[in-house]
Amino acid sequence: MMSVEESYLRCTACDQEAEHVVVYAGRFVSQIQCTGCGAVTRLDVSEDYLPDLRQRISSKPRRLMRRLRRDPGQLATSLPVRTLSKPGRMAQEFRTVWRSRRDS
């Protein structure tokens, strides 16, 4: 799952404390962009990404069962949409990892 978060950090390029956009590929930070100066730091997460992806895939049935027991109604309504959107989300995650590897 690729996610984008915002965080207040000190920029390594402009040395100012500013809001940064932090991009995750799975569980790994793959890119950080300073909203002040625009500097982008890409981190090569490719070595750790595939083993983590394997673990995420193998644990998915267990996590789905846990969600089913906790809130079956919510799972029933979200699963069809999430299933259809998953290929696009995974493609974006792969692009992020590839870009971080290429630009490091």
Image (spheres, helix red, strand yellow):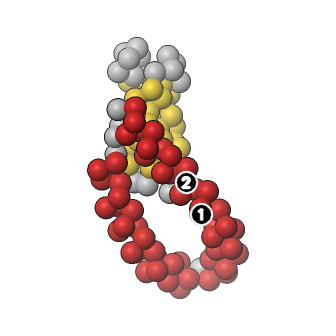
Residue that mark 1 sits on: 86
Name of the residue lying farthest toward the top: 14
* Residue under the point 35% across and 21% down: 12
Q: Secondary structure at mark 1?
A: helix
Q: Quadrant of residue 16?
A: top left
Q: Residue furthest left?
A: 47
**SS state under label 2:** helix
- In the rendered view, tell whether residue 14 sits above or below residue 8: above
Q: Taking 85 as reference, is 46 left or right?
A: left
On-image quarter of the C terminus: top left
Q: Left of 62 or right of it: where is 5?
A: right
Q: For mark 1, does the 10 Å Cα neighbourhood hold few (<14), some (14 to 19), or many (20 or more) residues? A: few
Q: Which amino acid, mark 2?
A: Ala
Residue at mark 2 = 91
Q: Looking at this view, is 17 or 98 the one in front?
A: 98
Q: Amino acid at mark 1?
A: Lys
Q: In the image, what residue occupies the spot 40% across and 67% down? A: 56
